[in-house]
Image (tube, rainbow, N blue to C red):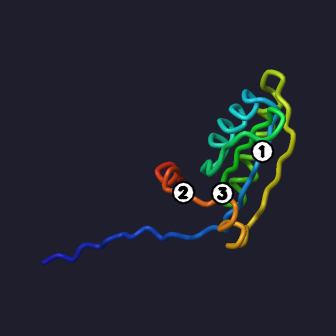
Amino acid sequence: MSKKNHAFPIITLMPQAVGVIQTVGFPAVLAAADAMVKGGTVTIVYFDKAERGEFLVAIRGPVSEVKNSMEAGKEAAEKSYNGKVASHYIVPNPPENLLSVLPLDFTEAVEQFRVS
């Protein structure tokens, strides 16, 4: 009887970050969201309208990936037609309290797209 070597993937939990970009107008947030998911291994966890015709998108993923994605998203938003980034922020290693109160957790709706 031969023994089979089963290779199990080693899962290393990388420190997670949350990144948020708020833009003026929908085309800019669409460009930002597209560039963010293409710019790093991140998952969009939240999108909504803000005040005064502004929109926001939030991502989660490993800290280094969120940083890369945020840069790509800000650049794409600014290059879109009349695009303007109103605000942006990265929270590395958000505490559990923050994730339980704000809508930034990996929900069932986004779980199928989760890459990290």
Judge from the rendering whether residue 116 lies leftward or rightward of residue 33; answer left or right. Answer: left
In the figure, residue 56 lies in which quadrant? top right
Image point 79% across, 21% down: which residue?
81
In the figure, residue 53 lies in which quadrant? top right
Q: Residues within 10 Å of mark 1 (few under 14, many from 20)?
A: many
> Spatial distance from mark 1 to mark 2, Cα to Cα?
19 Å
Q: The N terminus lies in which quarter of the figure?
A: bottom left
Q: How many labels does the image show?
A: 3
Element type at marker 1? strand
Q: Earlier in the sequence, mark 1 or mark 2?
A: 1
Mark 3 = which residue?
103
Judge from the rendering whether residue 50 lies leftward or rightward of residue 48; answer left or right. Answer: right
Front residue of this view, candidates 19 and 64: 19
Image coordinates of residue 44 in percent, x first then y, are 62, 48
Image point 53% across, 53% down: which residue?
114
Front residue of this view, candidates 36 and 108: 108
Q: Earlier in the sequence, mark 3 or mark 1?
A: 1
Image coordinates of residue 88 in percent, x first then y, are 83, 48
Image coordinates of residue 90 in percent, x first then y, are 79, 56
Q: Which amino acid lies under the numbered mark 1 shown in the image of this protein?
A: Ile
Residue at the extreme front of the image, as rendered: 51
> Spatial distance from mark 3 to mark 2, Cα to Cα?
9 Å
Up/down of 8 relative to 70, above or below: below
Mark 1 = which residue?
21
Q: How crowded is mark 2: few (under 14 residues within 10 Å), some or many (20 or more)?
A: few
Q: Which amino acid lies under the numbered mark 2 shown in the image of this protein?
A: Thr
Image point 78% across, 33% down: which residue?
77
- Marks 3, 1: nearer the viewer: 3
Element type at marker 3? loop
In the figure, residue 7 lies in which quadrant? bottom left
Mark 2 = which residue?
107
